[in-house]
Structures are given as structure tokens and as C-alpha cells.
Image (spheres, grey):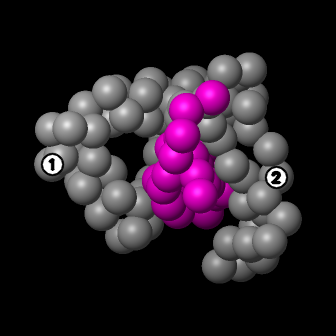
């Protein structure tokens, strides 16, 4: 099943920040690849998607965390939820893992 990606203001700003910093090109490439997987298969094994229980969406939606990078210090993660409409995924943040 394919999805349309929507970005919150925060997620759009996170992505723009990656795009503007040339030293983060490798990470930007990984994030774009992960976003592509989310569009085509949100359960792709490379994403290591799992529920993120400490947050919920604006209408109580379950939040998921997907890996853009793995086994890297400060590896980037993508936080998202299904909706608001069918076949849509809303990206709420793209951030390095603490």
C-alpha cells in the first residue's frame, strides 16, 4: 500500500535544516531513503518501525518511530502517525537520536 506523506511545520523545518547543511548530506540521503520507504511500505524491515508510547498525535493517534540510520551516533529518526486521511502518513519530526 502506498501513502502520501504530509509534514508538520516542525518536520518540514527539520528536513530543510538537513538540506541546508552540506556537512549532513549523508544523513539527508538516509532520511530521504527512509521517507521513500514510508511512502511505499511503512513496515519495511530497514525502517525498524515501532510504536513510540510517550507521544500521541493531535487526535490521540499512535506515534511511530522509524530509523533513517542505525548503528550510528546521533542516528536520525523519523516520528510519524497514520492520517489524518486514509493512505496518508503525517511526519511530525525528523531528529537525531539522543
- Residue 5 included in the magenta stretch of the image: no
Taking the spot 84% from the left edge, 65% from the top edge, the residue there is: 53
Q: In this view, does 10 lie above or below 23?
A: below
* Residue nearest the viewer, comparing 6 with 87: 6
Q: In this view, does 25 lie above or below 51?
A: above
Which segment is the magenta one? Answer: 71-98
Taking the spot 80% from the left edge, 44% from the top edge, the residue there is: 50
Pointer 2 residue: 51
Residue 46 occupies which quadrant of the picture? top right
* Residue nearest the viewer, comparing 97 with 8: 97
- Quote the CA–CA distance across marks 1 and 2: 30 Å
Residue 20 is marked as 1
Q: In this view, does 63 lie above or below 20?
A: below
Locate residue 77, reporting x and y percent.
57, 46
Quadrant location of the N terminus in the rendered image = top right
- Which residue sits furthest front? 73
Amino acid at each position: 500500500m502506498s501513502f502520501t506523506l504530509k509534514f508538520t511545520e516542525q518536520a518540514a523545518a527539520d528536513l530543510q535544516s538537513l538540506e541546508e547543511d552540506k556537512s549532513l548530506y549523508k544523513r539527508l540521503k538516509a532520511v530521504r531513503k527512509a521517507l521513500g520507504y514510508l511512502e511505499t511500505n511503512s513496515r519495511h524491515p530497514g525502517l525498524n518501525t515501532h510504536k513510540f508510547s510517550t507521544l500521541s498525535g493531535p487526535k490521540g493517534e499512535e506515534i511511530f518511530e522509524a530509523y533513517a540510520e542505525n548503528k550510528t551516533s546521533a542516528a536520525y529518526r523519523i516520528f510519524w502517525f497514520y492520517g489524518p486521511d486514509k493512505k496518508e502518513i503525517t511526519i511530525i519530526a525528523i531528529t537525531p537520536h539522543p
